[in-house]
Image (cartoon, rainbow, N blue to C red):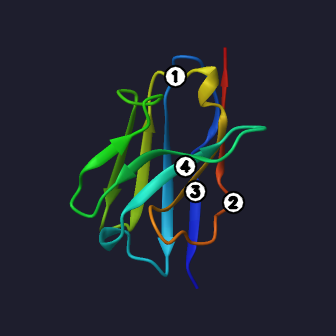
Amino acid sequence: QVQLVESGGGLVQAGGSLRLSCVGSGIIFSINAMGWYRQAPGKQRELVASLNIGGSTTYADSVKGRFTISRDNAKNTVYLQMNSLNADDTAVYYCNKRTGLLSWGQGTQVTVSS
């Protein structure tokens, strides 16, 4: 059974940083394009960062230059380094495939205080 487990969220002041982790079981991240998504209260879930199999990355305009997605193949873990956080980044963050979405994990809450 495929399972995605996100962690690393928390409460941080504006301008601060967090690093999120996503550990997968039943899926090999290195052969799948992966993404980090977020859902803010009252809003639809949105894709914020993508990591393709070859290592290329794309970002939503709202996080470009501040967020970095990466992968550790040995640990089968995908990361999201988030810097210069602001209140608009407050959301529950999830990882998932870019296509052929799997069941969503529980996500990890990120709250940025201004």
Which label lies toward us, 1 or 2? 2
User: What residue sits right under mark 2 in the picture?
Assistant: 106
Outermost residue on the right side: it is 42
Q: Which mark is residue 37?
A: 4
Look at label 1 and name its amino acid: Gly
Left or right of 37? Residue 40 is right
Give the mark nearer the N terminus: 2 vs 3.
3
Real-space Cα distance between discs 1 and 4?
Answer: 20 Å
Could you say which quadrant of the image residue 32 lies in? bottom left
Look at label 3 and name its amino acid: Glu
Outermost residue on the top side: it is 114
Which label lies toward us, 4 or 2? 4
Nearest the camera: 99 or 6? 99
Q: Are marks 2 and 3 in contact (CB under 8 Å)?
A: yes
Real-space Cα distance between discs 2 and 3?
Answer: 7 Å
Give the position of the C terminus as an image quadrant. top right
Give the mark nearer the N terminus: 3 vs 4.
3
- At x 44%, y 37%, the residue is 60
Left or right of 98? Residue 103 is right
- At x 41%, y 62%, the residue is 77
In what element is the residue under mark 4? strand
Look at label 2 and name its amino acid: Gln
Establish if 73 lies above or below 61: below
